[in-house]
Image: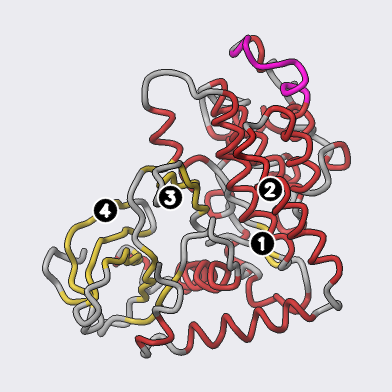
Amino acid sequence: MIQQGELLAGKYRVEQVLGAGGMGYVVAAVHEQLGQRVAVKLLVPELCQNQDSVTRFLREARAAVRIQSEHVARVIDVGELTNGAPYMVMEFLSGRDLAEELDLPGQLEVAQAIDYVLQASEAVAEAHSLGVIHRDLKPANLFLTQRPDGSPFVKVLDFGISKAITPEDNALEPAPSLTATHSLLGSPAYMSPEQIRRPKSVDTRTDIWSLGSILYELLARETPFTAESPLALLAAVVSDPLPKLRDKRPDVPPELEAVIAKCLEKNPDNRYQTVAELAEALSPFAARTSLPSVTRISGILRTSLQRPSGAASASSSSSSDATLKSHGSATVSYTHLR
């Protein structure tokens, strides 16, 4: 694993390890010439020779570069270390993810939980407008930071198992072996029934299920479905009735409980069909400061319907390719730094 003080790619001086998981880890670093603090994501050494893992890693970069929403963590640079291991440089974020937020004592206010989900939905709406499904939305992938005025700001992370839904975007499609196990295709507590059954054929409504699961958990402080083993949890998601949210959080209005329940319908035809529909349904329960998110979400999807077929995909793909191929240039690589 990379050590403190090490120089990556001849320009990123490592300060500390920020976090580690089963597949990768993230370090804080400073660009030696620009003095800009960044986060560098790397694969764990044992996976660097695994082509499926490298493919997933690079797919995350492609997807994130294409989505210009301020609610997506920016990818600034990608490349390979001298040993051939891939790396990804992202904007540095201060704060914690919503999984850590849930570990704190006390309950989230209803309006605050809705605000977090609406902010994340802005990123999801833009992804959907570009033909990309996230497929792994969960509290750990929603990072809570702050705007300059101190107000909470949510960033969506990890498009590593994103799926393209238009022919022009087939570079984002998972490699065949990446669809072999559920461990690489999402987190069981937030996966829709159709993602469990047929992971390669899901559409945008699987992300709507995940957003409903996240909002349920933010309010109830536990996921909609629980079980003693991963297999039992998958079975519960597919077959068990949804536990009533108000039994766990009585101050949730019945109408809001119904909105969340509609997100968590087993049959995707019975859910909200777009993120805009979900945002509109949540708007009566949102704080006034959250309503601009509802307007932006509707505008994003409305604009995408007005684009000529294939235009968005072609322009986005060329922009993505240009950014990813030019990681040697500081001028281009740092376009998205803020």
For marks 4 and 2 on the same chain, the one whose residue lies earlier in the sequence = 4
The secondary structure type at the circle numbered 3 is loop
The residue where tag 4 is placed is: 18
For marks 3 and 4 on the same chain, the one whose residue lies earlier in the sequence = 4
For marks 3 and 2 on the same chain, the one whose residue lies earlier in the sequence = 3
Can you give x and y, in whole percent of width and height, for residue 205 in the image? 76, 48
For marks 2 and 1 on the same chain, the one whose residue lies earlier in the sequence = 1
The kind of residue on which mark 2 rests is Asp
Can you give x and y, in whole percent of width and height, for residue 218 in the image? 54, 28
Label 4 Cα crowd, 10 Å radius (few <14 / some 14-19 / many 20+): few
Label 3 Cα crowd, 10 Å radius (few <14 / some 14-19 / many 20+): few
* Residue lying at 37% horizontally and 76% vertically, measured from the top left: 86
The kind of residue on which mark 3 rests is Arg
| Gap between marks 4 and 2 measured at Cα | 27 Å
Residue 192 against residue 131 in the figure, above or below: above
The secondary structure type at the circle numbered 4 is strand
* Residue lying at 32% horizontally and 82% vertically, measured from the top left: 84
Residue 50 against residue 261 in the figure, above or below: below
Pick the residue in front: 108 or 242.
108
Query: Which mark, by number, is residue 25?
Result: none
| Residue extent of the magenta highlight | 249-258
Pick the residue in front: 32 or 214.
32
Query: Which mark, by number, is residue 207?
Result: 2
The residue where tag 3 is placed is: 147
| Gap between marks 1 and 4 measured at Cα | 27 Å
Query: Which mark, by number, is residue 127?
Result: 1
